[in-house]
């Protein structure tokens, strides 16, 4: 075989092997970039922001534990969505007016049994509000955490305390995501630790429009955006993706909506039912592998 033929044959073999590797990888995990984010844990099935809910979301193959932060009177970060304890505990009042000891006396589970009797469980009665520190201790450093600084203007020092705990528990910052509606809070986190990946949360009250310039501006400090899904369209998602932003809409609980968003090109989504999204991604994988 002459030298020229050997070169042609080698190139053909190399090309075939590269092509085979690419298609095999794509077939093996066609939706590898669609994150299943367990919103407040598996909060469709268990009381939100409790260790029980987070553990359930983990068992249901959620890729991320999503945590909303509030801060107590004595400066402790706790997992709770609202600024008040009224909705998800048997207490009344602003989180900022409670010490951690007082927060720990509250029942954070019974409300769920009353509101969602179809998912009620006696074990939920008396569940406690966890601190961020307890969550880190429970799930350890290599779990994937998606953490929101809620109402940072109400809680001076929230960002510093969050990053202190991230350092103390050696949380894997390659996968850690910090999100907020507050651009100021995100920029503060960035200034304190530029290695932390940030997500800009967005809320729309009508049809969502995103310009290329707006997307480019957010890309300067954030790796992605988190818009409410119900006002999005494919053009919005593609504008964000073209700017290099991940797109993680919230909160998506119906399978048809999940599929639509996947088809539009989102890279993840928040759901109260992580098992639903997991099943859908598996079904899509099987269909594409045929």
Image (tube, helix red, strand yellow):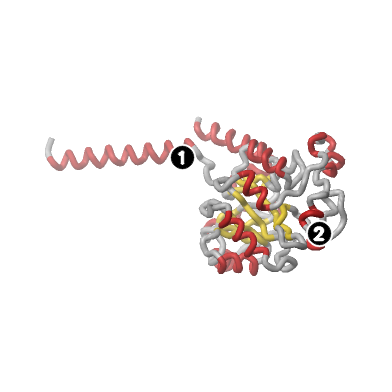
Q: Who is closer to the viewer here, 188 or 23?
A: 188
User: In the orientation shown, which residue stands out farthest toward the left?
Assistant: 2
Residue at image coords 21%, 41%: 8
User: In the orientation shown, which residue stands out farthest toward the front?
Assistant: 101
Marks 2 and 1, Cα distance to the nearest angstrom? 51 Å
Contact? badges 2 and 1 (CB < 8 Å): no
Residue 232 locus on image (x, y percent): 67, 55
Kind of element beneath mark 1: helix
Q: Which residue is mark 2?
A: 98
Residue 155: which quarter of the image?
A: bottom right
Residue 59 can be seen in this image: yes
Say if 84 sits above or below 275 in the image: below
Residue 43: which quarter of the image?
A: top right
Say if 191 sits above or below 58 in the image: below
- In this picture, residue 102 sits left or right of residue 18: right
Residue 260 can be seen in this image: no
State which tag comes first along the sequence, 2 or 1. 1
Q: Callout 1: 10 Å neighbours few (<14), some, many (20+)?
A: some
Kind of element beneath mark 2: loop
- In this picture, residue 248 sits left or right of residue 112: left
Q: Who is closer to the viewer here, 288 or 45?
A: 45
Identify the mark at residue 26; answer none if there is no mark: 1
Identify the mark at residue 277; answer none if there is no mark: none
Residue 71: which quarter of the image?
A: bottom right
Residue 254 locus on image (x, y percent): 71, 41
């Amino acid at each position: 075989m002459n030298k020229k033929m050997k070169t042609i044959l080698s190139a053909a073999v190399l090309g075939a092997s590269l092509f085979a590797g690419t298609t095999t990888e794509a077939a093996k995990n066609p939706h590898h970039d669609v994150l299943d984010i367990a919103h407040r844990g598996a909060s469709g099935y268990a009381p939100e922001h409790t260790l029980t809910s987070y553990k359930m979301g983990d068992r249901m193959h959620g890729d991320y534990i999503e945590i909303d932060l509030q801060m107590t009177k004595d400066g402790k970060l706790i997992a709770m969505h609202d600024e008040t304890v009224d909705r998800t505990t048997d207490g009344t009042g602003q989180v900022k007016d409670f010490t951690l000891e007082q927060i720990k006396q509250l029942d954070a589970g019974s409300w769920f049994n009353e509101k969602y009797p179809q998912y009620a469980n006696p074990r939920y009665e008396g569940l406690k509000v966890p601190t961020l520190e307890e969550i880190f201790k429970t799930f350890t450093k290599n779990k994937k955490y998606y953490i929101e600084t809620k109402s940072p203007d109400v809680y001076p020092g929230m960002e510093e305390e969050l990053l202190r705990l991230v350092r103390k528990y050696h949380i894997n910052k390659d996968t850690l995501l910090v999100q907020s509606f507050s651009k100021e809070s995100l920029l503060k986190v960035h200034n304190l630790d530029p290695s932390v990946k940030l997500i800009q949360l967005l809320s729309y009250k009508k049809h969502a429009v995103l310009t290329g310039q707006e997307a480019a501006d957010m890309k300067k400090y954030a790796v992605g955006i988190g818009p409410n899904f119900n006002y999005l369209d494919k053009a919005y998602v593609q504008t964000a993706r073209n700017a290099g932003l991940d797109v993680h809409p919230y909160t998506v609980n119906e399978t048809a909506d999940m599929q639509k968003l996947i088809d539009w090109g989102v890279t993840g989504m928040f759901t109260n039912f992580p098992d639903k999204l997991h099943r859908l991604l598996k079904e899509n994988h099987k269909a594409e592998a045929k």
